[in-house]
Image (cartoon, grey):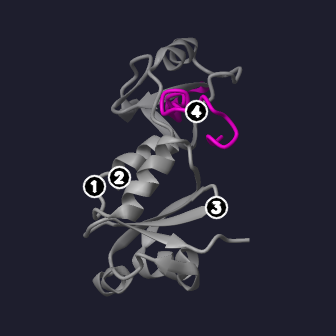
C-alpha cells in the first residue's frame, strides 16, 4: 500500500500485527506455541521447546489457546516504511536522504530490503548501472567488505537505493526507474 493508492496512509495505519516464532513443547508436541524471547506467550521456558523456522499462526487448530489470545493482544509493530525510516534518519545528510524520508512518511513502496555480504548485495541487487546520483560511497563500502543491507524504494517516478553498511554510514542513492 502506498500513498499513491491511499490518501489516509500513515505509519500508524501501516503497523503490523506482532509476530512470533512457532514452537512446540519438546515433551508434548501436539500443541503449537508462540515464542517471545526466552519463553512462550503462555509461559513455557525456551529450553523446554523445539523452535521451528516458521511463524506462529494463531488461526491454526493446533495453536495453544493462551498463546493465541496473548498474540492477538500483543502491541502492533512498525511496518517496513517506518522501520526503514528509522534507519535512514541517521544516514549521511543530504537532499536524497530528506526526499526519501518524506517519501517513506507518505508510504513509499519498499520493493526490496536484503542483507548479506557487501560484495554479493552490490553485485546482485544494487544495479549500479542504474544509479544516477549519490552512489559515490559505494567503492568504500566494497573495500570495507563486511555485511550490507540494501533497500530499493519506489515513490512515484523516483527510485531510491539505500545502502546500510554494518560498519559504516548509511547513504541514499537515486536510480533511474526500472522496468
Q: Which of pointers 2 and 3 indicates the residue nearer the eye?
A: 3
Residue 27 highlighted magenta (yes or no): yes
- Front tag of 4 and 2: 4
Mark earlier in primary sequence (4, 3): 4
Asked if the residue at tag 2 contacts the one at tag 1, i.e. Cβ–Cβ closer than 8 Å, the answer is yes
48 up-or-down from 99: above or below: above
Specify the principal SS of the magenta part.
loop
Mark 2 falls on what kind of element? helix
How far is disc 1 from disc 2 in space, using C-alphas? 6 Å
* SS type, badge 1: loop
Instruction: Answer with left or right where residue 68 lies relative to residue 45.
Output: right
**Image point 40% across, 48% down: which residue?**
85
Residue 119 included in the magenta stretch of the image = no
First-in-chain label (4 vs 2): 4
- Mark 4 vs mark 2, CA separation in Å: 20 Å
Location of the N terminus (image quadrant) = top right
Which mark, residue 90? 1
List the residue tagged with mark 2.
Answer: 87
Disc 3 or 1, which lies upstream in sequence? Answer: 1
Q: Nearer the viewer, mark 3 or mark 1?
A: 3
Amino acid at each position: 500500500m502506498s500513498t499513491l493508492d491511499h490518501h489516509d496512509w500513515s505509519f500508524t495505519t501501516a503497523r503490523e500485527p506482532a509476530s512470533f516464532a512457532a514452537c512446540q513443547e519438546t515433551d508434548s508436541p501436539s500443541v503449537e506455541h508462540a515464542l517471545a524471547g526466552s519463553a512462550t506467550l503462555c509461559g513455557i521456558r525456551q529450553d523446554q521447546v523445539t523452535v521451528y523456522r516458521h511463524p506462529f499462526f494463531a488461526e491454526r487448530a493446533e495453536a495453544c489457546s493462551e498463546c493465541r489470545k496473548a498474540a492477538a493482544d500483543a502491541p502492533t509493530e512498525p511496518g517496513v516504511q517506518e522501520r526503514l525510516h528509522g534507519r535512514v534518519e541517521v544516514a549521511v545528510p543530504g537532499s536524497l536522504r530528506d526526499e526519501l524520508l518524506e517519501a517513506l512518511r507518505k508510504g513509499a513502496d519498499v520493493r526490496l530490503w536484503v542483507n548479506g555480504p557487501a560484495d554479493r548485495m552490490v553485485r546482485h541487487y544494487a544495479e549500479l548501472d542504474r544509479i544516477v546520483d549519490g552512489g559515490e560511497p559505494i567503492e568504500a563500502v566494497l573495500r570495507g567488505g563486511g555485511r550490507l543491507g540494501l533497500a530499493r524504494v519506489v515513490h512515484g517516478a523516483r527510485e531510491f537505493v539505500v545502502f546500510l553498511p554494518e560498519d559504516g554510514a548509511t547513504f541514499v542513492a537515486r536510480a533511474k526507474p526500472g522496468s
